[in-house]
Image (cartoon, grey):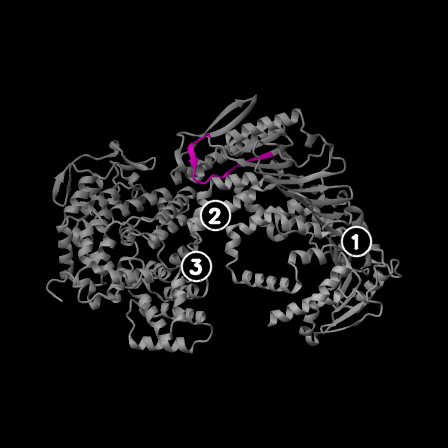
Amino acid sequence: MRMTRSVGLFFLFMLIAIDAKTGRTDETGAGNGSLAAYLPSGAIGTLETTKLAPLIERIETSGALQMVLDSPQWREALKQDQVQKALAGKALAEGQLGMSLWQFAKTYLGDRMILGVYPPSQPGAQPEGVIIIRVNEAASLTKLWDRLTLLLPLAGDKLKIGDYAGGGRLITMDDGGLIVVRDRWIVASKVKSLFDQTLQNLANPSPTKPGLLESAAWKEMGTQLGTDHHLQLCVNVAGITQLAGHRFIPSKLDNPVFSLLFGGYLELAAGSPYLGSTLDIHENHFELRSTVAGDPKQFDTAHRPYVLEGEPTPRADVPSLKSPLNGFSLTRDFSKWYRNREALLDASLLPNFDKFETGLATFLPGRDFGEEVLPLLGQRLTIVTTPQSYTHLKGKPGVQLPGFALLLDLAKPAEANDVLNLFFQSVILISNFQAAQEGRQPFVLSSEAYHETQIAFAKYVKQPEGATLPISYNFQPASARVGNRYVFATSLELCRELVDTLKAEAASPPARLAVAQGDAVRDLYVELSPEIGADMLESNHQILTAQNLQQGKSAEQSAQELAALFKILRQLTPITFSSTRYADRWVLELRGGWK
Amino acid sequence: MDTSKPLAPYDATTSWTHREAAHLLSRTQFGFTPAELERATNEGLEATLKRLTETQHESPDFSRAETSLRQAAISTGSIDNLKIWWLYRMRYSANALTEKLTLFFHNHFATSHAKVNSVPYMLRQNELIRIHAAGDFKQLLHGMSRDTAMLIWLDGNANRKRHPNENFAREIMELFALGVGNYTEKDIQEAARAFTGWHVRDGQFWMHELQHDDSPKTVFGKTGSYDGNDIVNLCLEQPSCPRFLATKLAKTFVCPDPSKDIIDQLAHRIRHHDLNLRPVLRELFSSQWFYEAENRRTLIKSPLEFVLGTLRTLVEPIRWPGVIKVLADLGQNIFEPPSVKGWEGGRLWITSSSLLQRANFATEVTTTSQFGPLSETVRHVSSEGSEAIVSQLGRWLLSDHLDDTIRQELLKFYVSAEGTADQKLRGLLQLILTLPEYQLH
């Protein structure tokens, strides 16, 4: 009964929304611009959706959705009570609406919607909000109204219906909520002043009071990001900072990796007028961007390591391998970042650096990491992963881990080469102690001249043999210096491939590197290939099956689930994440796609 | 009963009910499912014992799952994965008694991964035990003396010609074959020399001839140029060997304090069968003595019997990762026994702390799905009447040993409990699992 009442209230809301008889025509001439134009000024954030109808249509008819619905994972989820209840609710709603929820979403949520969030009226209270919905056409609301009229009595005394003085139907909820429906528009808020101002802005294209678009944050965001995105979030950073009386993004972070990756972005965000995020979904790919405004070159001394100086500025980039699984590249002034850690990181983290240096002393005895090792390195760190080759074994490990390589730019190549070679040898030595404890084969160091580059590598004294060797046999460490870059790889094959690739790309830069960066400097780049990931997972299917068995699943159930997972992964195209710094903003971007 | 011949056969034609079937299954398996109890009751003692003691074909589903779990353990080198593999076997293998005997000898030859540090070696030892657990003890003892994990565990590589290491020689006499009081320190010193050069190389037993002392040794009063095999054979020939085994078997499978008379008879049967355990076990589990009233529900369940037995009866399918943690918390961390003596068990399984942990486990099994959901069979019981529910659960969980006082208390609890039928059932299960009677089998 409770569900029926809630559903009834929802439908009643929609019912009122379509009362077109008393509504005015769309006299505002809203066009396709952002609905933020009609929101009152002073918002601390907005969330707007645009043209969702074609997107909903694509999702509804996509093969990917069908694949998910056919998957054993979904069949398993259907057994859960909550899913059953949700499906029952969906069926009930669709019965009352006379259309599927897909159709409902396309019809009534498929044009534009915006939620404006405003500071609370009293300290400590919840923020206030205004919602504006513009539907495709008034006629569709009329149809809905006709279906829902019968549900009106279910609302009881929860609401009152009347006329709004400025035109349209007014619903007054018993908790103070106000809803007005006018032609194609629905406006809702609990704050009368915001509500009235929004309706006034809707009625009058040249309002007496300045709208939200007049504020500095939205002006700059509109210029830098545009307004026609499927989803657009704007946070008025300057406004929130002003309200709080202090910066709400901490100046010292409590995670060193996060600091290294995003410390610059967050520092810029702290002084930015806005933080904007947009989502665009196209035929076979999507783009999710997050932008803050400002000039990173104005950072204080402590934050300068996030902005590289000097020419040429290295670009975060991943060498092009035959079978790339993952790539990661980061450019920073690592040495300065390390020296400035007291200013950049929470004090509680600092003792961990001492522990780190103590541990590292095992590998680099007698050298100070911050003062003697890091300055030898350059400003770019790159990691690539790829399916591992097993030429060092007679057989394969039972768990096949991805091979990976660490590429370090070198500021002082000759000196750095010696230090890193020492590090490499120490790793092998320590690995051999561990091998003795675990009863596995030890390594012996060897080297070869490969295409005029010297590669140092470890090999087993006696080549391990077996179809399912222990996990520790995955790797055969190898290292080499190619120009001003040092390569640590987990297999000789990968090291050789990187030697060839780095040399070829230095001699003849591929298209992606040939393009001048201009004022856009990419400082972080990550890529992931789901298809190759699926291959790797499939080669470990027995382990994945075992994990499922351990969780109580049957072997057959596990096989079905894994097959569905591999199929879905193989439908995806590579996913990339990047961070790019411009003269006036910093942009994070996630891209992905499907076949 | 013929008290002069306690190992005389039990006459199942006069009494073979759920009680007797439950008694047999609870001692020879890690608990039982309601279906297993019904089957054993219907098939009778002879057929059930034949099924328990003779090798059964494993189902294709079991074999497939078992292979995956074993492979995962080897490939990852994770001892937790190996533990789950074995627990899975204990629960689902068609050869339940073999698994219980494998645990018996895992405890007998207590070897810990904490020192061996190799999943493949621990697995190999476990499989060696499984092959011979219900078979020839002589082969098992010979196999263990050359087993890689055992040689690492008892420092085989340190046993050299000029510096004999007595670890293995001491344990084979004290813990593996004879027991304290049946050898001298001189026997150990001489036997240690016979095992010199029994080393491990490339993960395999290696007879390191250069480190073997082939000079004459005197052990148990006999002299010869003995090597390790000879010492094992000498131990197996000792009269104390079958007595040692008889005592352990009786205490593990029948009662905590077997009489000297029964041990003598059992030892005689073990020697009679030339240390081949299969016929001995058949005689033991079909003997009058095994079914005597005073020997029922007298053994304290080990953590494995308590946890796995509960899950076998109530839960399907089982989520395993939490199970190994509970077992470790309760004191029975398989593949990692506390010392060369293994788990002493008995009353030591119950402490104020472990009793609380058993109660916590009971709560988790009955009120959460951490270890998996209650099986369909158990959940369907809630559709029956109150008395039928109490009787059914008493049969499954207390081997039908439900005296009137407890029956009335359980009934009172169930009838007065609030909530849905499912909630009431879970409450009743939780209460039964925390009863002192449930800690026994």
- Residue holding disc 1: A34
> In the rendered structure, are the residues bearing label 1 and label 2 in contact, judged by CB atoms less than 8 Å apart?
no
Nearer to the camera, A300 or A117: A117
Disc with the residue nearer the chain's start (1 vs 2): 1
Mark 2: which secondary structure?
A: helix
Q: Are marks 1 and 3 on the same chain?
A: no
Residue B228, quarter of picture: top left
**Looking at the picture, which amino acid does disc 2 mark?**
Gln
Residue A180, quarter of picture: bottom right
- Which residue is situated farthest in the left direction here? B4
> In the rendered structure, are the residues bearing label 1 and label 3 in contact, judged by CB atoms less than 8 Å apart?
no
Q: Does residue A395 show up magenta in the picture?
A: yes
Q: Is residue A151 left or right of residue A22?
A: left
Q: Quadrant of the C terminus of chain B?
A: bottom left
Magenta region: A391-407
Residue B45, how many percent across, how many down?
Answer: 21, 60
- Residue holding disc 2: A560
**Looking at the picture, which amino acid does disc 3 mark?**
Gly
Q: Is residue A89 left or right of residue A176?
A: left
Label 1, label 3: how far apart the Cα atoms are: 51 Å
Mark 1: which secondary structure?
A: loop
Label 1, label 2: how far apart the Cα atoms are: 46 Å
Label 2, label 3: how far apart the Cα atoms are: 20 Å
Q: Residues within 10 Å of mark 3 (few under 14, many from 20)?
A: many
Report the number of discs: 3
Q: Is residue A193 left or right of residue A312?
A: right
Which residue is painted at 62% across and 25% down in the image? A503
**Looking at the picture, which amino acid does disc 1 mark?**
Ser
